[in-house]
Image (cartoon, grey):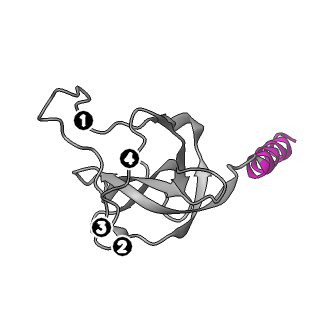
Amino acid sequence: MRGVLLILYFTCISISALSAPRPKGETISGRVAAYSTTPACLNGNGYWSMVIRVKRSNLGPEFIRVDFSLPCDKFPEWVSAKPPIQKFRLYRHKDCDAVLEGSMDEEPKQKLAMPIWKYPPGTEHDVLPFGQVVPCYRSADLPLAPVV
């Protein structure tokens, strides 16, 4: 009897875990405007963020930040070539929305402030929304690897 109850219990847990709501994915069109990466590899992965200028016909420029990871020896194509307008499969993560900072040291009078963001070729003149809250997403195609 106890074995049957345990089997029923684990079956119910499994079913509820499988039916739990998953983050809703969405496809967003845009172009990579800037990127940032960690200088070190952690567990074989490099951790990146990119700012995407979203392509929407009825609104002015809109930017989002996307966090993702790649194996340490891999780089996105747009690091060395002008990024095309493309479709990104993303999951919204409101818990990581944050003010977009321009440098490691935000004191404007500091001449040694280290820039956080790098610009892919052809996007150097894009004006990023520094000082504004930017929505945060995660990539469905380039998932963020856990840091162990």
Residue projecting furthest to the left: 112
Q: Amino acid at mark 4?
A: Val
Marked residue nearer the N-terminal end (3 or 1)? 1
Marked residue nearer the N-terminal end (2 or 1)? 2
Depicted 8 relative to depicted 107: above or below: below
Secondary element at tag 4: loop
Instruction: Identify the magenta region.
Output: 1-19
- Residue at (27%, 44%) from the top-left corner? 116
Q: Amino acid at mark 1?
A: Met
In front: label 2 or label 4: 2
In front: label 3 or label 1: 3
- Residue at (82%, 45%) from the top-left corner? 12
Q: Amino acid at mark 3?
A: Pro
Q: Position of residue 6 (x, y in %)?
A: 79, 42
Q: Decide which of 53, 136 is in the foreground and name it.
A: 53
Q: What is the number of the mark on residue 104?
A: 1
Q: Decide which of 78, 127 is in the foreground and name it.
A: 127
Depicted 37 relative to depicted 77: above or below: above
Q: Amino acid at mark 2?
A: Glu
Which residue is under mark 3?
121
Question: From mark 3 to mark 2, how far is it between C-alphas?
Answer: 11 Å
Q: What is the number of the mark on residue 77?
A: 2
Marked residue nearer the N-terminal end (3 or 2)? 2
How packed mark 3 is, by other alpha carbons closer than 10 Å (few <14, some 14-19, many 20 or more), is some
Residue 15, magenta (yes or no)? yes
Residue 92, magenta (yes or no)? no
Depicted 83 relative to depicted 146: above or below: below
In front: label 4 or label 1: 1
Question: From mark 2 to mark 4, how far is it between C-alphas?
Answer: 24 Å
Marked residue nearer the N-terminal end (3 or 4)? 3
Question: From mark 3 to mark 4, how far is it between C-alphas?
Answer: 30 Å
